[in-house]
Structure formats: structure tokens, C-alpha cells
Image (cartoon, helix red, strand yellow):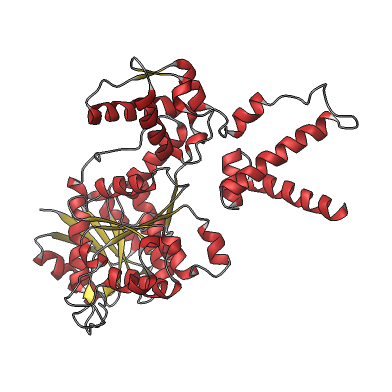
Amino acid sequence: MQKVLVVDDEPDILELLALTLERMGLAVTTAADLGTARARLAGDAFDLCLTDMRLPDGDGLDLVRHIQQCCRELPVAVITAHGSMETAIQALKAGAFDFVAKPVDLGVLRRLVESALRLRSAPQAAGETLLGESPAMQQVREQVRRVARTQAPVFISGESGTGKELVARMIHGLSPRAKQPFIPVNCGAIPAELAESEFFGHRKGSFSGAVADKPGLFVAANGGTLFLDEVADLPLALQVKLLRAIQEKKVRPVGGVEEIPVDVRILSATHKPLQSLVESGRFRQDLYYRIHVIGIQVPPLRERPEDIPLLAQHFLERLGREQGVAAPTLSPEAVRRLQGYAFPGNVRELENLLERALALCEEGRIEVRDLGLEGEARTPAAAVERAESPPGGLPPGMTLETYLAGIEKQVILAALEETGGNRSAAARRLGMSLRQLNYRLQKWEADHRND
């Protein structure tokens, strides 16, 4: 029999929770304060902990942090006061599996408990995975493994083509929701006038063309995961309704009267600088904080050139199987050329490039000429490495310091352009701190004003 530790200082609520869980066939142990809860955890093994946020000798966050240290594999869910979304988000960031708000909806509680208890049987590996042995990719895979054990909303950022949807699928595949639906949706591809119907469904006759009931994406993903790709493209009017659906865990179809309870985990992604859109008023700040509980940054391919040979081999083997031919090899020169290329389209561009090269190569070997990269953009490091000094040395009156400062400025401005003006992302790409980047930009601005 699976065991649950319930922590609450209100006898009536403690009794209600214990009775509900016992009817689910679970063995329940109770505690009325933080000290007793810690003693129970030290003396027994549990499959789930359910704790109130307000306790006589501390709060639920203290217990969440304690569990993260003493028994990390134990899922812990918190009970929050009605409307205390900020507190719930703090708990999720601290490592809580999920939360339920007072007054406790017993149906929501049962679904939460069932989902938490499935963690023990959650798959240990997903189907397709992120390839690469670079430190950056090892870190991303470790983040995926950790967040898969919670219900916290995850925001996945990165340039187009880096594999953000693959990260979302891995999180779903390693979670207790793995056997339930994974519903990806490109928010930018849905017409604004149809967005509400697409997400929340509609009733027959609710508007012209509504010839039948439609469930909507939230209902389709019930029990599973809804992946909001390019979430920055959501219309402002829909953002309000989306926020309410996420917080209340209920949706109301267009033309409907009653709300439908849904159990959906939200994963979202965009290649745009979402924080900048919040600051400019084009994306709601409250929704931003609700979907950005945990963030995962997927690095661009040019920042991990050591992964390119492994990725290339993977793609060529797959392309060979699909076309019924032996997978070609890459010449050492072709590998070096790929590793020096900037890949503005990232992993997706590498795959397309190799598909083209496979069609052009001869005798099962891809040479530099088959890649078609002559004259194409190189990585900042490769560009600097190949940079030549001006003919005849430096121009008259120009010092080496001035010449190198000009190169530095070009590389920094190029990084800012590639990240859509996101200074934090540009600083990470350049291997410098945000403070260092801001200092240089402010210095250039001051120099420009003084000219």
C-alpha cells in the first residue's frame, strides 16, 4: 500500500484529506506542524507528501526545501490559500511537484495524487533525445530530467531550429504524463479571430460556422501536456483568458455556460525576447510569470561546434535509411568547415544542408564543395580566427588597439542582432557578463554623443 504524509494544523482539513486519500486505497500518516513532519520523514518512507503552506512553526516552503535535501525523489504538493498564485509559484520553483488551492476541490486533489504516484513508474528515457556531449547540452538534459518530475510550467527559450519542441517532448516523455496526449500548437499560426475557439472549444451554433461542438486544445490535452510554441505571438485578448484557464484549471467553451475542469501541464517556447515584449506591453506580465516558473535555454549550434560531428552522423544515418542508401561519410575538411559555420538556422539547417549534400556527393563521401557554404557566414570565433590585417598593415593613424576595438564592436553588434536585441542572451553567446556588455554599449553611446 502506498503511503502519504499529510501536514496541516487544521483538524477538520486534516481529517477531510486523510479520509479522501484512504478512500483511494492509500495509507495516510498525519502531522500538525513542521517539526512533526520532519520526524515522520526521518522515521518512514513515503510515496507522496501533501502539506499546507501555513504551519505553526514554519511554512510549507520550509518543508519543500527540507524534502529536496533529505529525500529528493519524494514528490511534495502544497496547499495554498485561494488566490495566492505567487506563493504557489514560489513552491514550484523550490521543487514542489504541484499545488492545490483552498477550498480544496477533491476532484482536483485526486487527479494530483494519482499523477504524483505515477512518478514511481515514469519512464527513465524518452524516445528521441537531444544529441551532443558538450557541457551545454549535458546541462540541458539534466534540467529536462529534473523538471520532468514536477508539474511546474516550463518556458523553453532559444533560437529557431535549436530543438525547443524536442525539449518539450522529452519533458513529457520522462514525466508521469508520458502515456497521455502531447499536444503541440504553433500560437503564431492560429488566426486571432479563431484563437479562443481553438484553445477552449465551442458549442454548436455559438457563431457562424459552428456546425458542431468542438472540444478545443485544452480538453484534447487533458491529462497530458499542452506545448505552446511561439507563445509570444498570442493575441493580448487571448492572453487574459489563457492565464485564467491555467490558474483555475478550468475552461469555458465559446457559447458554453459551464466550465470544464482540465488537468493540463503547460510547456511554452519562443525564439523572441519575451521579457522585452513584457516591458513594451505586448505580452502580459502576469502570464509571463505564470508560464516562466522554470526556464530552460537551448544553446545555438554555433556555441557547441564539438557536437556537430555526432549530429551530422546521426542525420546522415537517418537520411541513408530513408533513401535506402549507405550513409555517406564526411571528409575531415568538411567537418572543419561545418564547425566554422555560424548556422543561423541551427540544427534544423544542419539537417537540411546534409540532405542536400547527400544528393550532391560522389562515392559516398561528402566534401567541402558538396556543402555549398562558400561565402556564407562564419561563427564570430571563426571569423576573427581568419581575419586578415589590412593590406600593408594598419592604416595611417590607426593603432592596433583601435583596430581590435572595431572588430570587438562588430562581433558584439552582430550577436545583439542575432538575439533580437536580448542583451542577456547576447552576453551568454559572447562568453561575457551582462555587466561587461552593458559597460561597452554605454561607453559607445557616450562616445557617439561626444562626437
Q: Is residue 433 left or right of residue 135?
A: right
Regarding residue 331, the answer to whether it shows in the image is: yes
Q: Quadrant of residue 383?
A: top right
The answer to which of 391 and 359 lies nearer the viewer is: 359
The answer to which of 272 and 153 lies nearer the viewer is: 272
Q: Quadrant of residue 200?
A: bottom left
The answer to which of 101 and 362 lies nearer the viewer is: 362
Give the total of numbered labels: 0
In the figure, 209 relative to 170: above or below?
below
Regarding residue 58, the answer to whether it shows in the image is: no
Image coordinates of residue 390 in percent, x first then y, are 78, 26
Check the image and name the residue furthest to the right. Answer: 397
Image coordinates of residue 450 in percent, x first then y, are 87, 53
Q: Is residue 220 left or right of residue 275?
A: left
Image coordinates of residue 217 in percent, x first then y, are 26, 65
The answer to which of 251 and 142 lies nearer the viewer is: 251
Question: At 28% from the left edge and 67% from the top edge, which residue is drawn?
Answer: 32
Image coordinates of residue 221 in percent, x first then y, are 23, 61
Q: Is residue 326 left or right of residue 272?
A: left
In the figure, 122 relative to 77: above or below?
above
